[in-house]
Amino acid sequence: MPAHAATHADDTRIAALDARKASRHRAYVQGKFGALTLSGGKFALPFHRTDLVWDGDFNTQSAAAVIDLPRNGTGLSSRLAALYAVLDEAPAGKDSDLFGVQTSLSTGKHPGRGLDLSGSYLNYHLNSLAGADAGNFRSNLRRADGSYLLNFELIDCIATLHLAGVDKRWAVSLTAEAVRNFGAATHADTGLLASVAVYTTNYTHGTRVRSGYLQAKADAVFAAFSRDNIGLATNYRLHQFAVDHALTPSSTLNPT
């Protein structure tokens, strides 16, 4: 597994950007103003996501604004989320940073019924890489001088269909995702996911069994933030089987 050069959990240099390093703890402030929620510090991403683009337990030091619009009798709920994070504080010149925005729509009021749709735009400005190590670059393409070959400007779309099971205690979900890096220098710029999950409708103390197929080309996603639990960040084809069992509302057993 890659080495990590950061020396403590709050290090903001790019060497601390691996998903494992960034997920060590959460410490943030949050304010709610009607439909608007503002957050600052280290917290869970306010985006609908999968392991294709983001490691499952990734938290980042950032600022975020989320607007949740209620159903109001329409059967639909929507969310708009925006995120800004400084990735590397450069002593001279521009910092490296990330800007992301996601809009999502959800339909259905009952467990096991409904459709969730989301679309995200993620733009990484990687101007300073002085603190980067192998754990950051991983499988992304690089120039001869060791820097990233080009840029990361992602469009990520996810659709999840929830279906009622034969037994009312269980439900089924089908998920499809496509991501493309419009800043890539080569055709290695796309990723795909297709998965099926069977889960208990009371997931707080329940179980989810999921199986899926994932494919990510070398520069489809930013490898430092992608899956960090099996050593495959990009440039792979993967068949995955996993079981998630919630031991408590805040802890999950996850053999994969």
Image (cartoon, rainbow, N blue to C red):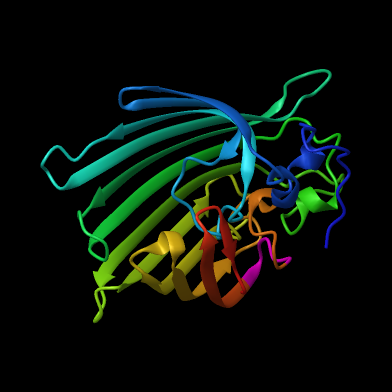
Q: Position of residue 180 (x, y in %)?
A: 50, 53
- Left of 237 or right of it: where is 211? left
Q: Quadrant of the N terminus?
A: bottom right
Q: Position of residue 214 (x, y in %)?
A: 53, 70
Relative to 13, does residue 167 appear above or below in the rendering? below
In the image as oriented, which residue stretches furthest toward the bottom?
Answer: 166
Q: Is residue 178 magenta?
A: no
Relative to 18, does residue 90 appear above or below in the rendering? above
> Which of the 4 image quadrants contains residue 202?
bottom left
Along the line of sight, the residue nearer the viewer: 19 or 249: 249
**Which portion, as a residue range, is magenta?**
231-236
- Left of 35 or right of it: where is 197? right
Specify whether residue 186 is in view: yes
Along the line of sight, the residue nearer the viewer: 75 or 87: 75
Relative to 7, does residue 182 appear above or below in the rendering? below
Residue at 31 percent across and 27 percent down: it is: 35
